[in-house]
């Protein structure tokens, strides 16, 4: 069995909270210990620039997130742990992918569409306050993934569409330039969506309802004390369904511990006692990490060095791979022999060529793979109509030849079935 490569990025835009811990940090650290798995974890600081224009916050968040992952047990010897902006091949690959991805795919990205819908609803310009960075976000993410040919990408549900797009980019690139990329698959971490925050809604920075992963013991106690409950008195039975406190406990406790609290709810534990139980349980898991975290936060140079070592490991893969990709697309040293491209070698295809003559009119022709003229158009007044005629040929086939409104002439020694075969070959290539 070949090693499965797992890769995931963490945007450096905030301070890790318990939702991040339960939903991504803890499972990722556990997964990195499995045999047969090679893990890549990185700090997505280029992505952070899309959302945040406070330099100090980016820097602070990068430090906090790195320290949190390391404190949670990520072993930088075992995994490739690096900072996105230390790998210049990633933005370079972003451009290559930009050139093979349809713009329409990006128009349909959820995050971009949500911004446009909001503007439309407000009656402003659809792209008002939308940076090109937000629009391009999925391409940068595709480059993160394809740079290391990751097989699996653990993400929250909200990111699944981005993985689909990365597959799309991989396939488009492979189709043009030969097999270079593995189309990645999403691994959905359902926990991410389910850890509730202080107010019972999903724990999320945007709701301001989070419990920081490395709050002090005293802060943690206070925050847990503030989790919403109903107003049932001590002694009254309490429902576990819909209890944020119970769900948070469950994310930390063993099955037996969870059962015990379920019983206690049924027999009327006071909210104060329930909160104390939850607090002690969470603190038990986090207290040892808290010390490591503090030590790391006090020694940023150590983290910087670790990340630099991680970047070296990442670039040991990225640099030669990027060299291969540059060659594949034709960015090559000029003294090397020009070769027949893999594309023409593999699948020689007929082509439509559109052009304008000295008479100012627009024309096109269909050439066979070996350059013979199959079909010659007459003059069109506009390139649009010429293009529509090509599109009609591609979708409706030779039937279009019989329309008197369309000026088309078959080439010398060409039959209708030659043309039909050429159109079919184009169709197949499109689907393949
Ligand atoms: N967009 C991801 C998020 O917000 C972070 C991210 C950036 C990422 N690049 C990635 C995740 C590559 C997985 C793979 O959660």
Image: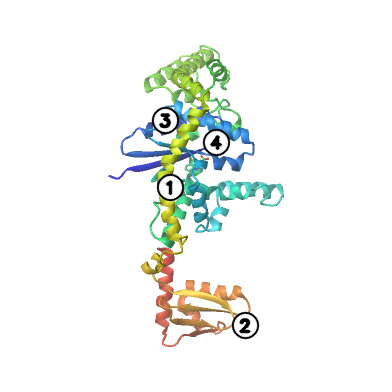
The residue identified by callout 2 is: 358
Q: Nearer the viewer, mark 1 or mark 2?
A: 1
Judge whether residue 204 can be spotted in this image. no
Q: Tag 2's secondary structure?
A: loop
Q: Look at the numbered discs 2 and 4 and tell me whether their residues touch, using CB distance below 8 Å.
A: no
Viewer-proximal residue, 248 or 371?
371
What x and y, as percent, mark residue 296? Answer: 49, 24
Q: Nearer the viewer, residue 320 or 427?
A: 320
Q: Earlier in the sequence, mark 1 or mark 2?
A: 1
Q: Earlier in the sequence, mark 1 or mark 4?
A: 4
Q: Nearer the viewer, mark 1 or mark 3?
A: 1
Q: How far is the residue under mark 2 from the one under mark 4?
A: 56 Å
Tell me how far mark 1 sits from mark 4, CA to CA. 22 Å
**Quadrant of the rendering where the N terminus is positioned:** top left
Q: Is residue 177 above or below residue 68?
A: below
Q: Residue at x 59, y 41 (%)?
A: 49
Q: Rounded to the nearest whole Å, what is the CA distance between mark 4 and mark 3? A: 17 Å
Within 10 angstroms of label 3, few (less than 14), some, or many (20 or more) residues? many
Label 1 Cα crowd, 10 Å radius (few <14 / some 14-19 / many 20+): many
Secondary element at tag 1: helix
Residue 212 in percent (x, y) is at 54, 25
Is 269 situated above or below 357?
above
Q: Which mark is residue 69?
A: none
Given the current orientation, which residue lies at the most extreme bottom position? Answer: 412
Q: Judging from the image, what secondary structure is the residue with disc 3 in? A: loop
Q: Reading the chain from its start, which is encountered first: label 3 or label 2?
A: 3
| Tag 4 residue | 12
The residue labelled by disc 1 is 318
Label 3: which residue? Answer: 74
């Amino acid at each position: 069995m070949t090693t499965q490569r797992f890769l995931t990025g963490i945007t450096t835009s905030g301070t890790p909270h318990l939702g991040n811990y339960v939903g991504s940090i803890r499972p990722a650290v556990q997964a990195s210990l499995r045999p047969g798995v090679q893990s890549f974890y990185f700090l997505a600081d280029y992505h952070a620039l899309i959302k945040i224009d406070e330099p100090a916050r980016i820097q602070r968040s990068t430090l906090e997130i790195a320290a949190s992952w390391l404190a949670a047990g990520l072993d930088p010897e075992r995994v490739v742990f690096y900072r996105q902006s230390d790998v210049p091949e990633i933005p370079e690959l972003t451009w290559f992918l930009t050139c093979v991805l349809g713009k329409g795919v990006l128009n349909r990205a959820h995050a971009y569409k949500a911004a446009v819908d909001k503007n439309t609803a407000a009656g402003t310009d659809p792209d008002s306050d939308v940076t090109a960075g937000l629009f391009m976000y999925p391409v940068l993410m595709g480059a993160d993934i394809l740079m290391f040919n990751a097989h699996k990408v653990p993400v929250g549900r909200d990111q699944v569409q981005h993985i689909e797009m990365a597959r799309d980019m991989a396939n488009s690139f492979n189709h043009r330039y030969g097999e270079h990329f593995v189309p990645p698959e999403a691994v959905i971490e359902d926990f991410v969506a389910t850890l509730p925050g202080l107010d019972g809604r999903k724990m999320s920075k945007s709701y301001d309802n989070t419990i920081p992963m490395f709050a002090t013991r005293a802060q943690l106690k206070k925050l847990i004390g503030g989790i919403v409950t109903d107003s049932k008195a001590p002694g009254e039975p309490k429902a576990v369904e819909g209890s944020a406190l119970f769900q948070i406990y469950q994310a930390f406790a063993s099955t037996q511990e969870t059962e015990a609290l379920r019983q206690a709810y049924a027999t009327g534990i006071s909210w104060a006692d329930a909160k104390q139980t939850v607090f002690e349980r969470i603190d038990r898991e986090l207290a040892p990490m808290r010390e490591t975290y503090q030590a790391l936060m006090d020694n940023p140079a150590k983290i910087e060095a670790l990340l630099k070592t991680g970047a070296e490991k990442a670039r040991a893969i990225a640099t030669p791979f990027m060299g291969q990709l540059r060659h594949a697309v034709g960015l090559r040293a000029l003294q090397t022999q020009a070769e027949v491209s893999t594309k023409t070698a593999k699948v020689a295809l007929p082509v439509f060529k559109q052009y304008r003559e000295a008479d100012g009119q627009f024309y096109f022709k269909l050439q066979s793979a070996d350059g013979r003229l199959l079909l010659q158009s007459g003059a069109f007044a506009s390139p649009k109509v010429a293009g529509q005629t090509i599109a009609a040929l591609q979708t409706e086939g030779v039937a279009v030849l019989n329309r008197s409104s369309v000026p088309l002439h078959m080439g010398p020694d060409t039959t209708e079935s030659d043309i039909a075969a050429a159109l079919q070959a184009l169709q197949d290539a499109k689907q393949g």
